[in-house]
């Protein structure tokens, strides 16, 4: 009994717990915190994108109310645009920049003409003190329904800015005739960095790296494929030197960009599918690869959705049958006989053709093509317009089915339309014959015609008419489109809930949804062995991970053999338990090497030392130029392009009184098969420089593909000291030790000495002064762009773009359509975009179009010089 009582009380106990939980004051505190943070984040980011849409359901409710109350005849039921969430914006004492807002207002509606759009809208911005600033949102005549404006705060301070509704009183002139604003958008864009954008920049200035334990990772910086190399780590601290007994976790990662394409190819079929379709019933598929085995299966099913997944399950233009067939993996498939024998030419339509196969490695692949079958009629759409209470217009539209890719549009040839017959539903019909061919209207085949019809007014004024359009095509195919028109109401529609309503416009389908088919798709499912192959021989792999203990010298090592070209990154983490307090302290070290098929080096420069594994060469000459020999090993059996980059290192931070005018120099040389060495001239413009040599396979002209660039044959890096002298270094240099650095007796007096200490071999991130580096990057690169002058300059700077294309266009001088070369010069600037035209003008001088080979110049058609009082930001030159 107790068990049953507990069960019966279970739901009441749950509700009690839920009530107590909700009433807990902690929830209120948490909710307030979340609300405050949300408000702060909104103000910190500043940018807003507000939207408004016409409430059609509200209008239907108003129009559906019973009664004939004439007292409300003068009531304005027009829906004015009020943007929700047009909340004030707060600025803080932490803001680094002025509040500088660009406004873009866009309105969309069934306006009758361009005059229904005003030239501008006014809005106000009010601050805490009640100061009001008027902002004019000016129409951009290049975008007829867009308005732009700008507001810049007078100072940087804690303040709150509120905004008025820009469209709260807007009623277009055509509203008296039934037009409305269908949709509106109001976008805020911050032209100067907001608080949330500037915070990361400020934080970056404060970052520097501290390592509790030092870890030096030593490995060769250039490696050879299939030859083992050793990675040795040393764990130490600045007081005790080498640390023994440290837990060392080491991992080696391989990054091989050059294997990306080949690895990706294992995840897809080698060939492409080409489908040939032609009247009356030719339908074949040819697979261009040689990796398929057994057979290619093909299925044809009806189209059931439009390009946005709308339902087309009852579409009469879709193929109504189903075909399954097995073709040959080598020759493809041929469904011509099957299609001709089972389906007449009047029984075709848009279908989904799926071709599937499998490779010997177990890759299952398929191709999906949405297309009209041979002898399918064109895409047919009917539109209706109510011109008055008793007169309508019916428009018939035909065009070729098509699909879009990023680069082009592909059309399908249809059969021809023969005629159409309209049954107006009042006992009258209209029949017309189509004399044109789709080929007369270009690639799209787009053609339309229309018919008007007047209905005699009925006694009730509520008469409905069932309209049917019978489209006839070649081979006896028919499409039937129907609609219902009600006198004084419009065309009948039903919403998703089945409720009927009326509209003055009707369409059987939208062209961009119905006539535009899906782009062909390819899919593949790899087998387990293919996935394993991709991981092993793909662009990224964890080669090994080992956990060990450092020896008496603080060392631990791994030996590995690179199987592929690429970068091999060694990451080592060491953990030590501190004896004084038992705390675990950690250090991380890293290094990397580039593995290639061959090697390359400089043979006639002396290597005097190594700096973190990089060789330090001595250019023992007082001359500013020197001939050096580049020698290649292991890659002499092919053409290869070798790029030598010589970069003078600017040490003006340490020696600011010395002029550093040397420029980087890049040279390309091509090795012929059998050549192993070439000479190049180096210019020594600075005491210290970096040299990098990069060799890739090429053709005889030194041309290199992207894949070859991603898989270099050999690389080499080093430092060059120009005519170095020796310093006297007395004493050991190590953890906790100091040494003296002095000029040798043979060197004259110096004003300044720059000393840099680094392990000869290996790299430890803790030895790098990251705070100095980040400060240098900030001062030289970041600050000029993010400080006030840089931000202002970015706003007012003008970017010029030039593009060109060819088309057929009307030539007013010859009064003919002619081939036309169109060259557009466009200026883009945030200041111009948001209405600041002051001081801006677009002028072109000495713009000639000249044929390079013949020297012939061409004249363009006259330019337009007016843009409704606004300066032009683009000019298009038309050359017939």
Image (tube, helix red, strand yellow):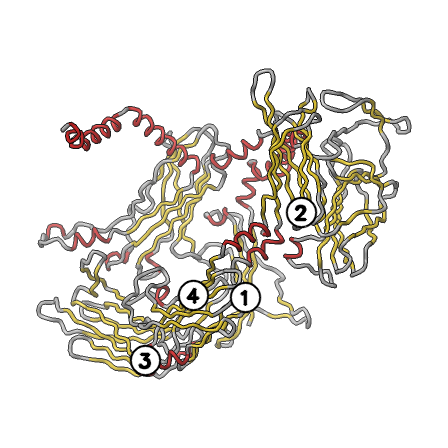
Pointers 1 and 2 in contact (C-beta within 8 Å): no
Position of 61 compared to 718: left or right?
Answer: left
Residue 288 appearing in the image = yes
Q: Earlier in the sequence, mark 1 or mark 4?
A: 1
Looking at the rendered image, the quarter that the N terminus falls into is top left
Q: Earlier in the sequence, mark 1 or mark 3?
A: 1
Residue 810 appearing in the image = no
Q: Which mark is residue 291?
A: 1
Tell me residue 307's x, y (percent): 37, 62
Q: Earlier in the sequence, mark 3 or mark 2?
A: 3
Determine the residue positioned at 38% across, 53% down.
Answer: 119
Residue at numbered disc 3: 346
Q: CA distance from mark 1 to mark 4?
A: 19 Å
Above-or-below relation of 217 to 409: above
Q: Quadrant of residue 202?
A: top right
Task: Give the class, few, some or many, for how many residues have Cα within 10 Å of label 2's Cα (few <14, many ≥20).
Answer: many
Dot 1 falls on a residue whose secondary structure is loop
Tell me residue 745's x, y (percent): 90, 26
């Amino acid at each position: 009994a107790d068990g049953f009582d507990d069960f019966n009380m279970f739901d009441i106990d749950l509700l009690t717990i839920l009530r107590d939980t909700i009433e807990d004051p902690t929830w209120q505190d948490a909710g307030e915190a979340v609300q405050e943070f949300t408000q702060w984040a909104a103000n910190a980011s500043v940018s807003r994108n507000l939207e408004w849409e016409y409430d059609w359901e509200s209008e239907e409710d108003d129009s559906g109310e019973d009664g004939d109350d004439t007292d409300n005849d003068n009531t304005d039921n027009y829906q004015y645009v009020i943007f929700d969430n047009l909340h004030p914006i707060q600025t803080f004492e932490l803001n680094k920049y002025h509040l500088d807002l660009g406004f873009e207002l866009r309105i969309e509606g069934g306006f009758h003409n361009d005059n229904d759009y005003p030239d501008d809208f006014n809005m106000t911005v009010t601050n805490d003190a009640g100061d009001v600033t008027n902002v004019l949102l000016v129409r951009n005549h290049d975008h007829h329904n867009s308005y732009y404006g700008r507001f810049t705060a007078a100072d940087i301070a804690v303040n709150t800015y509120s905004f008025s509704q820009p469209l709260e009183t807007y009623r277009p002139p055509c509203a008296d005739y039934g037009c409305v604003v269908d949709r509106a958008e109001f976008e805020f864009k911050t032209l100067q960095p907001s608080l949330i954008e500037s915070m990361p920049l400020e934080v970056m200035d404060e970052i520097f790296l501290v390592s509790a334990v030092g870890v030096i990772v030593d490995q060769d910086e250039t490696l050879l494929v299939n030859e083992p190399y050793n990675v040795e780590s040393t764990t130490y601290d600045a007081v005790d030197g080498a640390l023994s007994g440290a837990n060392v976790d080491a991992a080696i990662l391989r990054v091989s960009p050059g294997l990306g394409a080949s690895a990706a190819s294992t995840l897809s079929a080698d060939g492409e599918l080409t489908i040939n379709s032609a009247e009356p019933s030719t339908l074949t598929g040819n697979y261009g690869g040689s990796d398929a085995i057994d057979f290619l299966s093909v299925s044809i099913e009806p189209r059931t959705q439009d390009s946005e997944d709308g339902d087309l399950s009852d579409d009469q233009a879709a193929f109504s049958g189903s075909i399954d067939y097995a073709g040959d993996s080598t020759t493809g498939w041929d469904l011509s006989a099957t299609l001709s024998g089972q389906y007449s030419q009047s029984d075709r339509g848009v279908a989904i053709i799926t071709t599937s196969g499998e490779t010997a490695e177990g890759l299952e692949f398929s191709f999906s093509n949405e297309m009209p079958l041979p002898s399918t009629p064109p895409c047919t759409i009917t539109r209706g317009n109510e011109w008055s209470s008793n007169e309508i217009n019916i428009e018939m539209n035909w065009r070729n089915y098509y699909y879009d890719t990023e680069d082009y549009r592909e059309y399908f040839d249809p059969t021809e339309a023969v005629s159409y017959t309209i049954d107006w539903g009042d006992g009258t019909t209209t029949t017309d014959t189509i004399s044109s061919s789709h080929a007369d209207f270009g690639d799209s085949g787009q053609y339309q015609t229309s018919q008007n019809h007047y209905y005699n007014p009925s006694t009730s004024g509520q008469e409905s008419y069932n309209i049917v359009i019978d489209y006839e095509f070649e081979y006896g195919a028919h499409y039937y489109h129907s609609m219902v028109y009600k006198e004084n109401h419009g065309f009948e529609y039903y919403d998703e809930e089945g409720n009927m309503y009326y509209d003055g416009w009707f369409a059987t389908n939208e062209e961009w949804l119905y006539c535009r088919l899906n782009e062909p798709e390819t899919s593949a499912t790899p087998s387990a062995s293919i996935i394993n192959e991709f991981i092993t021989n793909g662009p990224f792999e964890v080669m090994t991970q080992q956990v060990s203990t450092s020896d008496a010298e603080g060392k631990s090592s791994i030996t590995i053999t690179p199987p592929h070209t690429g970068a091999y990154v060694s990451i080592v983490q060491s953990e030590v338990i501190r004896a004084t307090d038992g705390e675990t302290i950690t250090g991380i070290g890293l290094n990397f090497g580039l593995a290639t098929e061959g090697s390359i080096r400089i043979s006639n420069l002396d290597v005097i030392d190594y700096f973190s594994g990089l060789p330090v060469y001595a250019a023992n000459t007082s001359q500013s130029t020197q001939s050096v020999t580049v020698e290649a090993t292991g890659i002499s059996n092919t053409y290869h392009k070798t790029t030598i980059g010589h970069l003078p290192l600017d040490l003006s931070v340490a020696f600011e009184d010395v002029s550093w005018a040397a420029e980087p120099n890049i040279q390309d040389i091509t090795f012929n098969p059998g050549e192993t060495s070439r000479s190049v001239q180096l210019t020594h413009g600075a005491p210290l420089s970096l040299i990098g040599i990069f060799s890739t396979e090429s053709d005889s002209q030194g041309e290199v593909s992207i894949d070859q660039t991603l898989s270099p044959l050999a690389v080499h890096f080093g430092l060059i000291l120009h005519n170095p002298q020796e310093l006297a270094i007395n004493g050991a240099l190590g953890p906790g030790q100091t040494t003296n650095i002095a000029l040798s007796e043979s060197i004259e007096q110096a004003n300044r000495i720059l000393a840099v200490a680094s392990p000869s071999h290996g790299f430890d991130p803790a030895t790098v002064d990251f705070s100095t580096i980040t400060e240098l990057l900030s001062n030289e690169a970041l600050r000029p762009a993010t400080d006030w002058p840089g931000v202002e300059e970015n706003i007012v700077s003008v970017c010029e773009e030039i593009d060109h294309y060819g088309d057929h266009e009307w030539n007013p001088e010859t009064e003919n359509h002619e081939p036309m070369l169109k060259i557009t010069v466009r200026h883009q600037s945030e200041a111009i975009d948001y209405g600041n035209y002051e001081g801006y003008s677009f002028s072109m001088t000495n713009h000639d179009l000249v044929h390079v080979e013949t020297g012939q110049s061409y004249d363009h058609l006259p330019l337009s010089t007016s843009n409704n009082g606004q300066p032009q930001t683009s000019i298009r030159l038309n050359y017939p």
